[in-house]
Amino acid sequence: SSVSFTTSTMPSSAHGHARINGTVVTEEESARGDANDVVFILTSSFLIFTMQSGYALLESGIVSRKNEVNILVKNATNVLIGGFSYWAFGFGLSFGKTYSNLFIAIGSFFITANIDEMGVIYSKFVFELAYATTATTLISGAMAERCKFTSYCVVTVLVIFVYSIPAGWMWREDGFLAILGAVDVGGSGAVHLVGGCCGLVAAVILGPRAGRYDKGTQLLPLGNPTNALLGLFMLWWGWLGFSAGSTTGIVDDKWKYSSR
């Protein structure tokens, strides 16, 4: 199955022209604009994916040394299992076109696209995937040293499902929050609020780490402060793509908001 998305252009006319912000352009110029947007979206997505390394280093530096590898593997799991889950059903629940209402969408499961649409669709998918895996990564720190690896894999799939619904509310054209006029350019609600709430619920259910209060309220020592600082720097780098790429393009006036 395939799905199409609204891009920077309106449908082409019979004379091979399109209209952008009231200006008539040729199909070639329209296609060039789409190509520029796709390159920008993919570049931003690559930057966002570096945040996975940043979170992995940050979290591995905060936990005890014996659990460093466990945290690193969990963050790899975010991309592997979370990515597969988002491809299989998450993207379709957010942006599916077979059926949609104010609260949920259906369609585009195991997403694929024909050759004419693949540039726009796959770049959209990769960017949204980067956002989705960021939401699952947020819960990794909350569950650090608190659960088994297999349990975390199950939670990753559940978080992808939970994330996909409100993401559609906000970013799908007929999502009820979008219709109400809500704006979430950088994912403060759909990504960070959802991921943070899931992390809070997990931390409350699992309780404190083993041995956390053996010495009263004294803070546990950092396992590797160097890793934590390196992770911080990588997160700063990835955040440039996370925020700037949220305009999902540079054609028309999008580049102005992206630079801001």
Image (cartoon, rainbow, N blue to C red):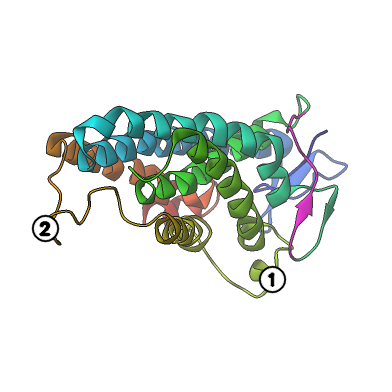
Q: Is residue 250 visible?
A: no
Q: Work out whether residue 242 or residue 24 is closer to the camera in this orientation and state it.
A: 242
Q: Give the residue type at disc 1.
A: Ile
Q: For mark 2, does the 10 Å Cα neighbourhood hold few (<14), some (14 to 19), or many (20 or more) residues? A: few
Q: Is residue 111 magenta?
A: yes
Q: Is residue 244 above or below residue 43?
A: below
Image quarter (top left, top right, bottom left or bottom right) of the C terminus: bottom left
Q: Is residue 91 above or below residue 219?
A: above
Residue that numbered label 1 is attached to: 179
Residue 154, x across and y down, in percent: 57, 40
* Label 2 secondary element: loop
Q: For residue 235, which quarter of the picture?
A: top left
Q: Is residue 37 visible?
A: yes
Magenta part of the chain: 103-113
Residue 173, x across and y down, in percent: 71, 60
Q: Give the residue type at disc 2.
A: Gln
Residue that numbered label 2 is attached to: 218
